[in-house]
Amino acid sequence: MMKTTLKIVLMVVSLCMAQYAMAADGKQYLLSEKTYKVLEAAQELMAIEKYSDAQIKLNALLKKVDPASYEQAIVQQTLGYLFSSQEKYGQASNYFQQALESNALPAKVSHNLQYNLAQLLLADEQYKEGIVLLEQWLNADASPPNSAYVLLASAYYRVKNYKKTIEHIRIAIKNDSSMKESWHQLLLSAYLELKQYRSAINVLESLVASYPYKKSYWNQLSALYLHQNKEFSSLAVKMLAERLELGDAKTLINLANMYRYLHIPYKSARLLTKGIKDGVIEADFENLNQLADSWLSAREAQKAADVLQKLTALDNSGKTDLKLGRVFFTMEEWQQAVMPLTKALDKFNGDQVGTASLLLGMVQFHRNNLAQAKKQFTKAVAFDNERNQAGQWLRHVERQIESEAKGES
């Protein structure tokens, strides 16, 4: 029931401010000294959970204040808080409704009270009424809290409006960078109700990445893969779930490897990225290198370059510098390619020098730096693997240099 799952957050009346207030439109709101003292005494009784005594005082006061007045609305509002504190949501809702219908409260107070009333209606399982009121409140609020979207999504789920559930819970998830398991569970349930299995798989993959020790998510993911006729993926996930004792990080890394093996490198990269961000997977050389390779396989060159630039600090061999240079080369970022290729050459010995020299020579050629290109191609022709290609480039560059020299003369 929603009474047990919904947390009611009520904005308590501040009597120290309620005795005299002025609204934004300049209208004054005043409590008499006598009314203020009774309200203050009732609130003190409520604070120590003497609700019956507080109710007696408030009921007596309600008979004395003027009808449809600011004082009456404040007393009704306080009675609403009293009953809501006792989880008597139906009675609380009635008093809040009366206070709102009086139109005697400042606009800001009415706005806050409307939110409280919507929460109470939903807690009392009056879902349709609560949804209407909460939608109105959201439309009138300039910056509603995420909790309002979550509350509305939960209410829509109760009335089986799963599309609206997805709409509002996705807003909450988008607005909060931290992982909220219950929000994703609600989103997953709505997708499953609508039989939107691909979207459900995406949610489960996020849950698996954040909570790899919860086998229920792995089992659900395996079942959905099977439902989508992805038998191999289903079997692989099931096998990984059975080997969770290997440790959370290793399990996630194995899952990332599986995605790459299945030619789904983008999911592999996303899983590794999230695992590293959440601290589940260590950001060491091996894992970052796998992440870079996944982004490369997914044709996300810039993301791969971003990872490789961090990785160069962990590798003194020059191989990562060379890989980064290759990535910039494929992106035709000639200027950016120069530094990592130069660093690679400084670190290399043997045949690797020929590879880096050939690539750097082509980069310099594209930068129209023919003298440097000739220097690198000359170096590269000394190596068997690069001799033919470097020789062709060298002859081409020499002809161009000669042509330019004749043109100048």
Image (spheres, rainbow, N blue to C red):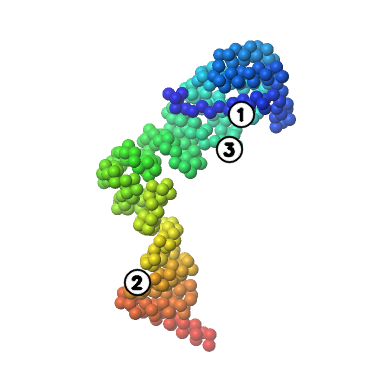
User: Residue at point 47% right, 32% down?
Assistant: 153
Q: Dot 1 corresponds to which residue?
A: 111
* Residue type beneath disc 2: Gln
Q: CA distance from mark 2 to mark 1?
A: 70 Å
Image position of 312 with respect to 129: above or below: below
Secondary structure under tag 3 reads loop
* Residue type beneath disc 1: His
Dividing the image into 4 quarters, which one contains the N terminus?
A: top left
Q: Name the foreground residue: 341 vs 347.
A: 347
Q: Name the foreground residue: 217 vs 134.
A: 217
Q: CA distance from mark 2 to mark 3?
A: 58 Å
Residues at circles 1 and 3 in contact by the CB criterion of under 8 Å: no
The disc placed on residue 143 is: 3
Secondary structure under tag 2 reads helix
**Nearest to N terminus: mark 2 or mark 1:** 1
Quadrant of the image occupied by residue 341? bottom left
Q: In front of the other: label 2 or label 3? A: 2
- Looking at the image, can residue 329 be seen? no
The disc placed on residue 352 is: 2
Q: In front of the other: label 2 or label 1? A: 2
Residues at circles 2 and 1 in contact by the CB criterion of under 8 Å: no
User: Residue at point 62% right, 25% down?
Assistant: 13
Assess disc 3: are there few (<14), some (14-19) or many (≥20) residues with their C-alpha within 10 Å of its C-alpha: few
* Residue type beneath disc 3: Ser
